[in-house]
Image (cartoon, rainbow, N blue to C red):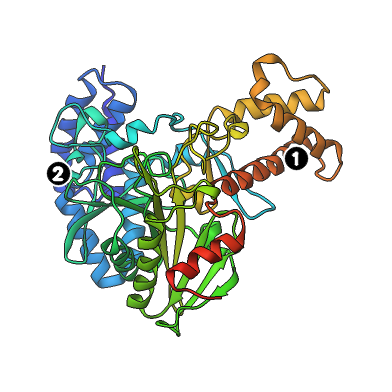
């Protein structure tokens, strides 16, 4: 039997947290009564309740616009993010339970217990299509209110990027602070061209407190949805943003722009300037050259019978002096030795990370699978009890031996600290695997072919 006291509490919650108009109190109470008597359970029930109690999409959009105009971009995104937490679309209570730590080599590592491990890149190309309803894929705006995908409480806001219709929504299981996605209203495949670079700069002009970036638009090195054009961003300073330039390079056509190779395990060029057109010109020149670049001696093949293999992952932040655009060179070429990708995490690290190394990890924030919490705890127990590695954990032999050595060195105090250090070491080496140029001389030779000089 439905507990009417629970309904009253939900109505008060909605009035205080979700801007429910008191005039609608009785109507919403009766709607909740129907939902609670419908037999829904668990996540479906919560989704239905808070979808009913949330403002309509048009009301959310109007409120966001009013706050933006009156109080600015940060106030608007603060309001929207808190609303999406309060209406239970963003699962912050779940996300806050994910282990997270910084490492001595400058990376950040999280263990995502909220989502299953994603190992099949073919699903990315398919775009995670939905079986029915109005939406073509899981990130289409037509998902707002869709019961079958627990999207009843999804709310989005409209964006205008270079006079094209986009929208912004927060990720229910975000990987970092205020993790959101900017999505093209038109369902077209992921792609990266000059317009992409212009859109990213346009976004940070509108939301200067957020970073924004675009996954490489290829399987194995891209995101989990390649069938629908979108970007990722949010309110966190990622490790890549804090990296420094180690080698300065110049473009004679843009003498006032700072360009340099980053001190970073991946292959990254940073372009900094107050002039957005200069930044976009240089980044697009690098992109155009990289897409066509081959160097078989280095394992780099631009195109073969399986298609194009080179792409970039651009990411932008607004700074006091203008903009930083970091251009990450990526390749998804495979080989007999590395069938999952030559510039992907190598097999010895797959026990820790086999999923695609996408935009977020390429910037130094690693999202490791939830299974590792239990598996790493078991490895720690085996090491402290001086137990051999059982056959069932054979895939962890590298981690076991290295963590054991770190622990026994006495430099880390306890096994848990030593294991965190080992995770940092592994993830750093994975980023080195993704580097298309292992040596700076090779990187410089490519940049010189583009017209950039040391």
Give the number of the mark in front: 2 or 1: 1
On screen, residue 298 versus residue 72, left or right, reads right
On screen, residue 217 versus residue 267, left or right, reads left
- Asked where in the image residue 109 lies, by quadrant, the reply is top right
Asked if one can make out residue 253 in the rendered structure from this viewpoint, the answer is yes
Residue wearing tag 2: 24
- Residue 114 horizontal/vertical position (percent): 45, 33
Residue wearing tag 1: 418
- Between the residue at mark 2 and the residue at mark 1, the CA separation in whole angstroms equals 56 Å
**451 up-or-down from 220: above or below:** below
- Asked where in the image residue 43 lies, by quadrant, the reply is top left
- Residue 352 horizontal/vertical position (percent): 59, 33
User: Secondary structure beneath disc 1?
Assistant: helix
**Which one is nearer the viewer's eye here, 312 or 302?**
302
- Residue 430 horizontal/vertical position (percent): 59, 43
Q: Quadrant of the N terminus?
A: top left
**Which one is nearer the viewer's eye here, 304 or 81?**
304
């Amino acid at each position: 039997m439905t507990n009417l006291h629970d309904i009253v509490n939900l109505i008060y919650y909605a009035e205080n947290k979700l801007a429910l108009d008191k005039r609608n109190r009785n109507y919403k109470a009766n709607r909740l009564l129907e939902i609670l008597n419908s037999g829904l359970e668990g996540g479906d029930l919560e989704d239905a309740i808070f979808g009913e109690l949330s403002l309509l999409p048009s009301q959310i959009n109007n409120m966001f616009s009013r706050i933006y105009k009156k109080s600015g971009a940060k106030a608007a995104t603060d309001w929207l993010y808190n609303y999406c937490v309060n209406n239970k679309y963003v699962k912050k209570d779940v996300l806050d339970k994910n282990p997270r730590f910084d490492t001595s080599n400058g990376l950040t590592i999280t263990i995502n217990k909220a989502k299953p491990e994603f190992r099949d890149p073919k699903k990315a190309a398919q775009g995670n299509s939905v079986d029915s309803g109005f939406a073509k894929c899981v990130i289409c705006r037509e998902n707002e209110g869709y019961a079958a995908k627990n999207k009843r409480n999804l709310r989005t806001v409209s964006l205008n990027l270079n006079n094209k219709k986009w929208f912004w929504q927060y990720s229910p299981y975000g990987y970092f602070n205020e993790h959101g996605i900017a999505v093209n209203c038109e369902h077209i495949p992921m792609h990266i061209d000059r317009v992409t670079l212009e859109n990213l700069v346009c976004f940070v002009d509108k939301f200067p407190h957020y970073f924004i970036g675009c996954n490489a638009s290829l399987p194995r090195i891209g995101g989990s949805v390649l069938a629908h054009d979108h970007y990722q961003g949010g309110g966190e300073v990622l490790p890549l943003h804090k990296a420094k330039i180690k080698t300065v390079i110049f473009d004679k056509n843009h003498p006032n722009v700072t360009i340099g190779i980053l001190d970073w395990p991946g292959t990254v060029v940073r372009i900094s300037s107050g002039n957005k057109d200069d930044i976009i010109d240089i980044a697009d020149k690098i992109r155009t050259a990289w897409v066509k670049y081959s160097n078989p001696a280095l394992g780099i093949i631009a195109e073969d019978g399986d298609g194009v293999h080179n792409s970039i992952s651009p990411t932008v932040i607004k700074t006091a002096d203008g903009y930083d655009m970091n251009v990450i060179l990526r390749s998804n070429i495979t080989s007999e030795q590395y069938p999952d990708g030559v510039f992907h995490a190598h097999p010895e690290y797959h026990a820790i990370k086999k999923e695609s190394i996408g935009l977020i990890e390429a910037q130094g924030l690693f999202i490791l699978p939830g299974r590792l919490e239990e598996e790493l705890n078991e490895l720690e127990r085996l090491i402290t009890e001086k137990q051999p590695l059982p056959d069932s954990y054979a895939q962890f032999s590298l981690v076991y031996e290295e963590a054991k050595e770190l622990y026994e060195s006495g430099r880390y105090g306890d096994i848990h600290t030593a294991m965190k250090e080992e995770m940092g070491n592994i993830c750093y080496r994975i980023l080195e695997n993704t580097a298309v140029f292992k040596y700076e001389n090779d990187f410089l030779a490519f940049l010189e072919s583009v017209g950039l000089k040391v």
